[in-house]
Image (cartoon, rainbow, N blue to C red):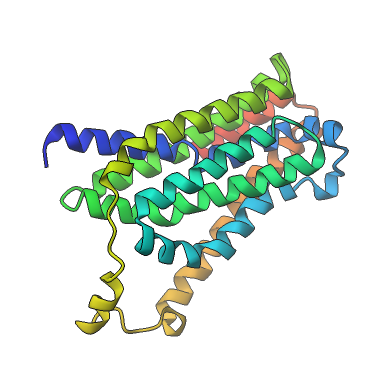
Amino acid sequence: MKKKQTNVILLCIGFMAINLRLPITAIPPLLPSLEKATGLPVSAAGLLTTIPLLTFAILSPVLAKLGRRFGNERVIFSFAILLVLGSMLRINTALPTILIGTFLIGLGIDSANVLLPAVIKDHLPLKPVLGVSTYTTTMLLVGALGTGLAGIIVAKASLLAAMVGLAIISVISLIGWTPMIKQNKLDSGKIQRAEQSGLNTQSVWKSSMGWMIAFFFGLQSLIYYSLITWLPTIFVAKNFSSIQGGTFVTIMQI
C-alpha cells in the first residue's frame, strides 16, 4: 500500500475517532446549565451519559451483521449521519429534543465503536497497530480536552455556543470519513467461509475467558463513566468553578 493511501486512511480514522467520546465527555460540565434550561432534575441528569451507553449494549450485536451485509465503511457513514442529526437536535435545549438527540448520538457512536477496528484490519492489514493507536489516541485525547473546553465555552459564552460547537465538530467528522465510502468492502460470506474452514465455531457465550474479559471491562467502564459524569458536579459543589472542575476531569482522563 502506498504511503499516501495509508495517510488518507489514517486521516479518515482520526476524523471519525474525534466523535467517539466527545459527545459524551463534553456533557458533564454542561449539566448544571442543561438542568436549568431543560428542567431536568439532578437525579435524572445522568441519563444524558447513560443513554448512549445503553444504545451501545443494545445495538452492538446488530451492527456486525449490518457491516457484513452493506460494508463497514458505509454503515459507519450512515450512522454518523444520525450522530450529526442528534447533535443538531441538542442545539434546541428542550428536554425532548435533548433526549432524542442523545439517543441518536449513541447510535452514531456505537457503529464506529464496533466496526472501526474491523475497518482498520481490512485496510491496514500490515499496520494494524498504527491504525488502532491513531483511533484510540485521537478518541481519548479529544474526549479529554472536550471536557475542559466545554466548561470554558459555557462559562465564557453560553450553553448554546457549546452545543453548536459540538454539532459543527460532528459535521466535520462526517465529511472527514467520506473518502472511505469509495473503499467500502462488502463480504457477506466471510463468516460462512470461516465456519466451513473450522474457524469461529465456539460460541462466545460459552467462553470463560470471554466472560472474564467482559466483567473486567464492564467494571472499568462503570468506574470511568461514573467519574466522567459526576466529578465536575462534585467539584462545583465543593466551591470550584465549572472551568476548574472541567480542567480537573480533563487531567484525570489524560
Seen from this angle, which residue lies furthest left? 2
In screen coordinates, is 193 left or right of 155?
left
The residue located at (26%, 39%) in the rendering is 9
Instruction: Answer above or below: position of 233 versus 206.
Output: above
The picture places residue 32, in percent across and down from the top left corner, at 80, 33
Q: Quadrant of the N terminus?
A: top left
The residue located at (74%, 40%) in the rendering is 98
The picture places residue 84, in percent across and down from the top left corner, at 56, 37
The picture places residue 138, in percent across and down from the top left corner, at 40, 36
Q: Quadrant of residue 245?
A: top right
The residue located at (19%, 82%) in the rendering is 197
Does the image show residue 13?
yes
Q: Looking at this view, is 211 or 172 the one in front?
A: 172
The residue located at (38%, 32%) in the rendering is 176
Instruction: Answer above or below: position of 19 versus 153.
Output: below
Q: How many marks?
A: 0
Q: Looking at this view, is 137 or 57 the one in front?
A: 57
Does the image show residue 238?
no
Seen from this angle, which residue lies furthest top? 156
